[in-house]
Image (cartoon, rainbow, N blue to C red):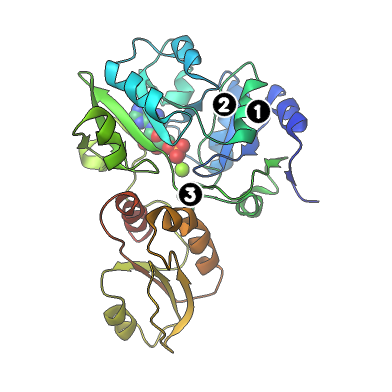
């Protein structure tokens, strides 16, 4: 029997019983549990096979809830929360002791956001606790953007995926920490740098493991298909190099037809970066199921969401 369901009251009941439910958000599906239940939080790490040093994002129902879980909120954090919540931006703030260490990997900060999905906002309003919800995929695998992706990963491990359709943004939230009150981007994501800078001015990016020890879990290899994947700015050349292999192609808007390509996905014929982001992970899931020898992925324009997509493709090809 399928674990996919739209039964909100069943999701509430499972979560109240310290069990896990996969939930839809605008970014990717999350594997959710009660942040105050040690049993549920441990189950999240175990189900994903995620290392305990990699902290979880806490999903809250509204801005007012912030003061329950964090100490002072820097001025620019307030501006960002007001501008983008509910939405795909995660703020890393000094935590109050109510937040268990298991959630934060022992750090004195907690990552928090309000997701923008009607079903999950409804769910959060019916619970008396926030939800810890990392992406609902095994550690290092491709993130799920459809209920079916979660089911294929976890049908034997969890009881329910709350079906909220395909995720609209399609890549993870942008994560922002604060150093001396100034915002720093720890992870590129579904909110573009340009949109963030329009609210708080020029912002520094520290999204590489070497420069961001504050953000554990920014792994070089992540979001990866099982099939060998390469990233290129020159598809024609890459096809020529690998023409003896069974090739899958992931392009932005390319119309190139080549007999050497066994399977091809175009992310956005109209060159729309939002559309490309929303389709990215489903495309990788599809390509990974075609028994290909190699996936050739085309690098996207390096601005707006293109930057975030390129970041994910780089981590998928390491
Ligand atoms: P996800 O797996 O998409 O839910 O993202 C969780 C990521 O958020 C982690 O891998 C960290 O990079 C980041 N993160 C979570 N909590 C913290 C924290 N307290 N400080 C810094 N980064 C955090
Ligand atoms: Mg993840």
Is 282 left or right of 274, judged from the image as shown?
A: right
Q: Is mark 3 within 8 Å of ligand 1?
A: no
In this rendering, the count of numbered labels is 3
Pointers 2 and 1 in contact (C-beta within 8 Å): yes
Q: CA distance from mark 3 to mark 1?
A: 20 Å
Local secondary structure at mark 3: loop
Is 187 left or right of 115, judged from the image as shown?
A: left
Q: Residues within 10 Å of mark 2 (few under 14, many from 20)?
A: many
What residue is pinned by disc 1?
123
Image region (quadrant) for ligand 1? top left
Q: CA distance from mark 3 to mark 2?
A: 20 Å
Q: CA distance from mark 2 to mark 1?
A: 10 Å
What residue is pinned by disc 2?
131
Using the image as rendered, state which of residue 138 and residue 205 is in the foreground: 205
What residue is pinned by disc 3?
170
Mark sitting on residue 194 = none
Place of residue 39 in the rendered image (x, y in percent of width and height, measured from the top left): 62, 25
Local secondary structure at mark 2: strand
Q: Quadrant of the C terminus?
A: bottom left
In terms of sequence position, does the residue under pointer 2 or pointer 1 come before the other? Answer: 1
Q: Is residue 274 visible?
A: yes
Place of residue 89 in the rendered image (x, y in percent of width and height, measured from the top left): 40, 33
In terms of sequence position, does the residue under pointer 3 or pointer 2 come before the other? Answer: 2
Pointers 3 and 1 in contact (C-beta within 8 Å): no
Local secondary structure at mark 1: helix
């Amino acid at each position: 029997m399928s674990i996919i369901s739209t039964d909100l009251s069943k999701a509430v009941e499972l979560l109240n019983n310290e069990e896990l439910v996969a939930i839809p958000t605008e970014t990717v599906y999350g594997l959710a549990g009660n942040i105050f239940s040690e049993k549920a939080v441990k189950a999240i790490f175990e189900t994903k096979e995620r290392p305990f040093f990699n902290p979880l994002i806490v999903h809250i129902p509204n801005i007012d809830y912030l003061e329950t879980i964090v100490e002072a909120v820097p001025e620019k954090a307030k501006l960002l929360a007001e501008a983008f919540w509910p939405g795909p931006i995660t703020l890393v703030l000094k935590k109050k002791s109510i937040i268990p260490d298991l959630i934060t990997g022992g750090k004195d900060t907690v990552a928090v956001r309000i997701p923008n999905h009607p079903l999950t906002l409804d769910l959060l309003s019916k619970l008396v606790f926030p939800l810890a919800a990392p992406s609902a995929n095994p550690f290092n695998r491709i993130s799920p953007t459809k209920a079916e992706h979660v089911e294929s990963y976890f049908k034997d491990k969890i009881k329910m995926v709350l079906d909220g359709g395909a995720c609209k943004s399609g890549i993870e939230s942008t994560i922002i920490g604060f150093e001396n009150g100034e915002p720093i981007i720890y992870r590129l994501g579904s909110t573009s740098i340009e949109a963030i800078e329009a609210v708080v001015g020029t912002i520094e990016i520290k999204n590489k493991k070497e420069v961001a020890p504050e953000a554990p879990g920014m792994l070089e290899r992540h979001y990866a298909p099982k099939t060998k994947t390469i990233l290129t700015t020159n598809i024609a050349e890459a096809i020529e190099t690998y023409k003896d292999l069974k090739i899958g192609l992931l392009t932005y808007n390319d119309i190139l037809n080549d007999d050497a390509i066994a399977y091809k996905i175009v992310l956005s014929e109209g060159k729309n970066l939002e559309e490309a982001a929303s389709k990215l992970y489903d495309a990788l899931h599809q390509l990974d199921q075609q028994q290909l020898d190699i996936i050739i992925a085309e690098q996207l324009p390096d601005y707006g969401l293109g930057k975030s997509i390129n970041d994910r493709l780089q981590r998928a090809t390491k």
